Amino acid sequence: MVRCSTLSAMKRFAALIALATMLAGGAAPAQVPPPPDLPGQADIAIRLAEAFAHKDAAAYADLLADDLQVFEDGKQIASGKQEWMASFGRKLAAPGVQFHLISGYSSTGRILFIEYFNSLASWGRTPPPDCCWGYDAVAYDVADGKITRVQRLPGGHARLAEDGRKIAE
């Protein structure tokens, strides 16, 4: 009589042989598609882009969870929607400060954008059209229909081409 542990070991061995045979030229393993976005995540991404395009601080704030956490270069800079809006909301809505959102990527629970912004923070003055832009990569984590975490990675002022070379400004 074969003991259970021996039978279990034989099953594991057979599974390893089947896997090795498959990888060595047998049937190709099926690709597993990525998990879908969370419900409402695409709508949040669209509304986020629209809030930036219209410099609408109220629409932006409506996307944020009350217990929002905001990080820059890994350091927490705001705890809660109210604290974040007190600093960033003013900048978003300020006359003369310009923003552009460049599409990034979306995965389950995360939306990524590149934010281009007028780094003069002109607060009412019109900057020269080709001057003084900064770039940040920003990840927005989504849960329960709200943005719960913002992770900002300042990119500086030197823009790179797709091949990595610096683009002259």
Image (tube, rainbow, N blue to C red):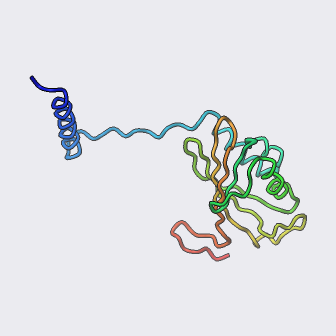
Q: Residue furthest top?
A: 1
- The answer to whether residue 104 is above or below residue 33 is below
Q: Residue furthest left?
A: 1
| Residue 163, image x, y percentages | 51, 69
Left or right of 65? Residue 57 is right
**Residue depicted at x 68% and y 71%:** 157
- The answer to whether residue 98 is above or below residue 85 is below
Left or right of 62? Residue 111 is left
- The answer to whether residue 152 is above or below residue 4 is below
Say which of 124 and 140 sits in front: 140
**Residue depicted at x 79% and y 56%:** 88
| Residue 53, image x, y percentages | 77, 51
- The answer to whether residue 19 is above or below residue 3 is below
**Residue depicted at x 90% and y 64%:** 124
Residue 121 sits in quarter: bottom right
Residue 30 sits in quarter: top left
